[in-house]
Amino acid sequence: MNKATIIYTFVFFLHLQQSRCAPQVRLFERQSAGSTLLTCQVTGFYPRAVQVKWIGEDLQLVEDEMNDVLPNGDGTFQTGSSVIRPEENTGDQRYSCVVHHSSLEGNITVTWGKEEKPFRLYVWIPLGCVFIVTVVGLVIRGFCYNKAFVVAGQFILLS
């Protein structure tokens, strides 16, 4: 490391210590061994101290998972918390991850519920595009194969 890099790094972290960065919160769901695991990922916050808790009925904290606060490469921090959602009779039950941090005036609350599962647009949009391209291709192929066109209401057959 050269002298300029060391000075820049020192100034960057000094500035970061005087400022506060609000956390970003995301929820993820995954199936694991016959149960549903809900994970609350909290990232991009500074200073290090943060509280993450879950609210909902019959939730089990995942004990064997490390929920330490870890550094990001930009001087901010990240952490996470996972719970096991009960499978039976969930109905319209909602589960919320509540994050409290000194950069916030209140809390950030992100709620997971059945109707809030991601719609998987990244799957449906490409499939829709493939369908449209296929239909247009078949129509064009049909016209070219028959060498027939309709122009101004008249059917023209090409030889």
Image (tube, rainbow, N blue to C red):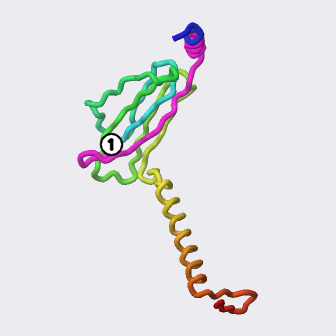
* Above or below, 63 relative to 37: above
Q: Quadrant of residue 55?
A: top left
**Residues in magenta, as a range:** 8-37
Regarding residue 122, the answer to whether it shows in the image is: yes
* 55 relative to 84 in the view: left or right: right
* Above or below, 16 relative to 100: above
Residue 154 is situated, as x and y percent measured from the top left of the image, at 72, 92
The count of marks equals 1
- The residue that appears at 57% across and 12% down in the rendered structure is 5
Residue 152 is situated, as x and y percent measured from the top left of the image, at 75, 87
Q: Nearer the viewer, residue 52 or 91?
A: 52
* Above or below, 120 relative to 140: above
Regarding residue 18, the answer to whether it shows in the image is: no
Q: SS of the residue at dot 1?
A: strand
Residue 48 is situated, as x and y percent measured from the top left of the image, at 46, 19
Q: Nearer the viewer, residue 79 or 96?
A: 79
- The residue that appears at 55% across and 9% down in the rendered structure is 2
Q: Quadrant of residue 148?
A: bottom right
- The residue that appears at 49% across and 60% down in the rendered structure is 124
Q: Nearer the viewer, residue 58 or 46?
A: 46
* 55 relative to 130 in the view: left or right: left
Residue 35 magenta: yes
Residue 76 is situated, as x and y percent measured from the top left of the image, at 50, 22
Classify the position of the C terminus by image quarter: bottom right
Q: Residues within 10 Å of mark 1 (few under 14, many from 20)?
A: many
Q: Which residue is mark 1?
A: 37
Considering every residue shown, the one lying at the far front of the view is 159
Considering every residue shown, the one lying at the far left of the view is 33
Callout 1 amino acid: Leu
Q: Nearer the viewer, residue 67 or 105?
A: 67
